[in-house]
Structures are given as C-alpha cells and as structure tokens.
Image (tube, helix red, strand yellow):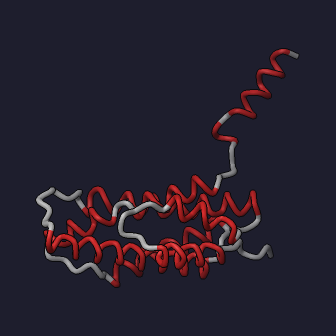
C-alpha cells in the first residue's frame, strides 16, 4: 500500500505527465521570441541586410503550418498568427534601427544563422505546442486574457496596437475538426 501511494505521488508530481500549459507560460514564450528582434536588427544593420526577407518569412510560415497540422491545430489560423508575429518582429526591427541612427551600437550582435534563427525556430515550435496544450485544457483563448497578454509582452518596441494585432490572431487559433 505504501509503495502504491509513493508511486501515485510520483506520477502526479512528475513534470513529464503535465500536459497542460498556462497562458502565462505561452505568453512568456511569445515574448521571448520577440526579444530576439533587436539582435536580428543589429546583425542585419551591421551586415547591410534588409529587414524584410520575404523568402525567409515564407519558410517560417510553412514550417509553422506543418507543425500546427501535426499537433492538431488549424494551419490557416497558425499562418495568421505567425504573419502577425512576423509583422510585429519587423516593426521592432525597424523601430530599433531608427534608434540606431542617433544612438549607434558597437555591440557585437548574436550570430543570426548559428544562434538566433535556431532559437527562433525552437521558440516557434514551442509556441505551437503550448497553444495546443492550452486549447486542450481550456478550450480556446478568451478576450479576457488580453490584460495578461498585454503585461506579459514587455519588449521595448512593441506597441499596444502590435499586441492587439497579435492577440487578435491568437484568439482565432483552433484545433482541427475531428474526422
């Protein structure tokens, strides 16, 4: 009996058995992904690379749609979310680059290919996984979560309208219909 009790507690308290995710965890992941954008902007500025990279954006969106489908989320809603996230990411980069005109940075940026992009891809995958876990637990994202989202997204160059755009697409994320 004692062994059964200990075994049951181990299963209940084991981090691997926890399938749910909180909105705070998801919002933190989204914020972390956006936190890399100043590094991206600085790297691109120092390498004389334009901020907008349509081909790269297409790759990111296609990867996200495939990952969403594999996790059971509607790829079209994930596409909308990632397009919004990319728009906000570019806005951060443009705003930071504008500040660099009057306050140049002599920092060495993180390596875009070797460090930043792999982290961004990982965070994108993590975001999709967390969205699915959240939806499985709570059913959907609710408008009442915006104040929590607003507080969680604390990147310097992200405006309230950026947050509203991103959150609006998050509200639309749904599971694929069960066949």
The quadrant where residue 10 appears = top right
- Image point 72% across, 68% down: which residue? 140
Residue at x 57% of width, y 73% of height? 167
- Farthest residue, direction bottom: 54
Asked if 11 appears above or below 124 in the picture, the reply is above
Residue 63: x and y in percent read 48, 72
Quadrant for the N terminus, please. top right
**Residue 62 visible (yes or no):** no
Query: In which quadrant of the rendered view does residue 42 lie?
Result: bottom left
Q: Is residue 124 above or below residue 22?
A: below
Residue 38 sits in which quadrant?
bottom left
Pick out the residue farthest to the top: 2
Q: Is 68 left, or right, of 4 in this rendering?
A: left
- Describe residue 7's horizontal placement relative to residue 101 as left or right: right
The image position of residue 21, as x and y in percent, is 65, 52
Q: In this rendering, is residue 14 above or below 45? A: above
Q: Position of residue 59 (x, y in %)?
A: 41, 77
Residue 94 x/y as whole percent: 28, 77
Question: Is residue 157 shown above or below 58?
Answer: above
How many tags in the picture? 0
Residue at left offset 22%, top offset 71%? 99
Q: Mark yes or no: residue 95 visible.
A: yes
- Quadrant in which the C terminus is drawn: bottom right
């Amino acid at each position: 009996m004692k062994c059964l009790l200990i075994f049951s507690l181990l299963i209940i308290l084991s981090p691997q058995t926890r399938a749910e995710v909180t909105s705070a965890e998801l919002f933190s992941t989204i914020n972390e992904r956006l936190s890399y954008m100043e590094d991206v902007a600085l790297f691109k500025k120092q390498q004389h690379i334009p901020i907008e990279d349509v081909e790269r954006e297409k790759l990111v969106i296609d990867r996200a749609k495939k990952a969403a489908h594999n996790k059971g989320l509607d790829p079209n809603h994930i596409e909308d979310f990632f397009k919004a996230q990319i728009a906000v990411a570019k806005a951060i980069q443009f705003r930071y680059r504008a500040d660099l005109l009057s306050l140049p940075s002599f920092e060495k940026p993180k390596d875009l290919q070797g460090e930043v992009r792999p982290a961004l891809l990982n965070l994108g995958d993590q975001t999709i996984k967390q969205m699915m876990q959240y939806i499985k637990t709570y059913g959907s994202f609710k408008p009442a979560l915006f104040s929590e989202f607003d507080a969680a997204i604390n990147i310097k160059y992200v405006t309230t309208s950026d947050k509203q755009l991103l959150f609006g697409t998050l509200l639309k994320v749904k599971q694929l219909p069960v066949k």
